[in-house]
Structures are given as C-alpha cells and as structure tokens.
Image: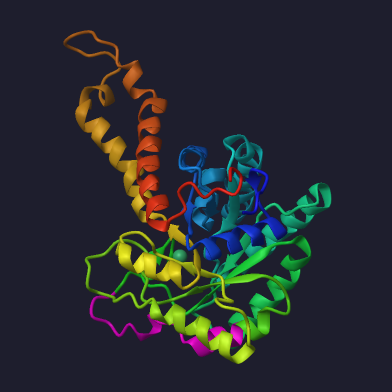
Amino acid sequence: MAHLKPGVVTGKDYLTLVAAAKAGGYALPAVNVSSSSTINAVLEAAAKNQADVIIQLSNGGAQFYAGQGMKDGFQAKVLGAVAAALHVHLLAEHYGVCVVLHTDHANKALIPWVDALLDHGEAYFKQHGKPLFSSHMLDLSEESMEFNLNECARVLSRMAPLDMSLEIELGVTGGEEDGIGSELEESADNSHLYTQPEDVLQAYERLSPIGHFSVAASFGNVHGVYKPGNVQLRPEILKNSQALIEQKRATSAKPLNLVFHGGSGSEKEKITEAVGYGVFKMNIDTDLQFAYSEAIGKFVTENPKAFLYQVDPETDKPYKKFYDPRKYLRLAEQNMVTRLNEAFEDLGSKGKSLALN
Ligand SMILES: [Zn+2]
C-alpha cells in the first residue's frame, strides 16, 4: 500500500490518494467548513478514524472565514479561502492524516473567484513548490456544454502547471447550496438532474489531454435534506459513464474520478453502490451543519438561564463556565465528530489513511 506524508496532499500525492480510494473501494468525505472550529473538528474526526479527508470551502464559507464584516465581500471570499488554507497547511500534518484542500461550487459569476485564488496559488507555488489548494471546482452545469468545457479547459490549463486538479460538474445537482442552484420543486421535471454519459465522454476527450480532473456527475443527487421520494438516485448513470469511456477510449477500468454531491440524507445502499462505480469523494455539508447546531441547541435548552444572566438572579451562581463560547462550541465540534464517524464508516474509509498504513 502506498504511504504518504501526513498533511495537505497535492499533485502526485493527490493522485495516489484518489487511486488508492478507487482501488480500495472506499471514498473520502468532503466536508464544507467555514471557521477554524469546523476545520479542527474535521481534522479531529479524521485523526480519530485514521482516515484521510477532504476539507472544502464554498464561496460563502470562505467569506465567513474572513469575517462577514469585511467591507469588500469579494475580497473576503478570496482572502477567507486563503486564510483557511493556510490554517490547514499549518495544522494538518500534526493531526497525522492526509488532507485534500478544495473549493466547492463556482458558477459563472464566481469564475473571477477561482481566478483570484489561482493568482494566490501561483504565488504560493513559487514560494513553496506546491500549490495552496489541491483542487478547485468549476460548476458551469447551468451553462451550455460548450461554455462549460471551454472555461474548464482554460482554468485547467492554469492549474496543471501548479500540480492542481479541477472538479467539473455535468448535469445539475438539485437543491441549493450557498446561493448556487435553487430549492427543489416538488414533482417538477427532474430530467436535468441526470447526467448524460455522452457528455461525460465529451468532457473526458477535451480535458484529459490538459490535466487531471474529476467529475461531479448528477445521478439524481440533491443538496440539502428533503422529504424522501422527490428524486430517485440512479447510480447506474455513473457505471454507464465509466463503461462508455472504457469502450470508446480503450482505457483501464473506471477511468473517471467521480464525485458525489449532496451526500447528506442519502440512502446507505446507494452510497455504497456509487462508491463501487468510482466515486472517491462524497460531499457532506447539511448533516454536519445540523450536528454542529444540534449540540448548541441542546446545551442552551438545558441551561437557559446561563444565556440570560451572567449571575443567576435567584441563586447568585455565576454562569461564566456556561456562556464562555468555548464551552458550547466544543460540544458542537464533538457532535460534528460523532456524525463524521458515521460518514467514514459509510464510505469505507475508516482506518485507511495513507499517512498511517
Ligand atoms: Zn455540491
């Protein structure tokens, strides 16, 4: 089994990590973070599970990391992502696991965000010989196929010399994530939620000569957690996409590196099936947001007076130990770790860290 140094993995090491997951029949959870607290919870969970992990920032998560009070929102989205990445670069190796650093959905309006991050990435590469992020995502699935692939090709040409990978999206992930996409309409025509394998082949032919990329193919997956039954998960779309490329381009088995968006609330059997078809990354955000907030809600409900008075008006008891934010944020982190234990288990990546094996 391959062995990697713990810390942020990029370039060849990233490819080793992806190949090991596909060969080993497991996937890594990709967790959306927005603060040092959530990043540390992900690192803690990965270390506890002896598993490698993907840490990613949406544009909104990055902005929150920099501070929503920052005047220039665009600048905050760029600098917040850079600050979070530096935080992970510094700490990840000390948790003893491999971490992939990634940014989430960037639609057409957010292309300048990705370009600005690549400006920082190029400067970082010059100084350190490795990129700031392992990969970025461009989600141009709402544009024409031509625009999508042209723009992906342009950005990948910038990323390849930095040893970076690009995640693209073909077909639309349902639901809404950080202002991208729209809330799911019940009983709407959901055919756009399913990627056509022919489109995947076209992307493969266009992008594989340029550099490394992965595909978020839509197979009925949805952001957020909705009442079950609205959309049917059809992982066989992933299998058919792999088969088409294997056949047309005479590649080895499972040539595509696939990404599963909207993992929260998905049926376990469908997750296992998708991983079997070459999914190495499953995004999980909503369930972890809930886990984080659930613990705080429980603590506040159990100790309501500590959030109304510094000193109890009846008993004179001081509540400092309760309202100190570290108290309830730590409980939130611990509950996030507990939910992540489940994710590592579901994805089969528990105990599989390449930094330890
Ligand atoms: Zn997504």
Residue 106, image quadrant? bottom right
Q: Is 202 a magenta residue?
A: yes
Residue depicted at x 23% and y 80%: 187
Q: Is 256 a magenta residue?
A: no
Percent across and percent down for residue 259 are 50, 67
Q: Nearer the viewer, residue 147 or 112?
A: 147
Percent across and percent down for residue 34 are 49, 47
Percent across and percent down for residue 75 are 63, 52
Colour approach in the figure? rainbow
Residue depicted at x 40% and y 82%: 194
Res 169 seen here: yes
Q: Which residues are magenta?
A: 185-203
Q: Is residue 125 above or below residue 333?
A: below
Q: Is residue 62 above or below residue 165?
A: above
Q: Quadrant of the N terminus?
A: bottom right
> Which residue lies most toward the right here?
126
Q: Indicate the quadrant of ligand 1 in the picture.
A: bottom left
In the figure, is residue 119 to the left or right of 307? right
Q: Nearer the viewer, residue 3 or 302?
A: 3
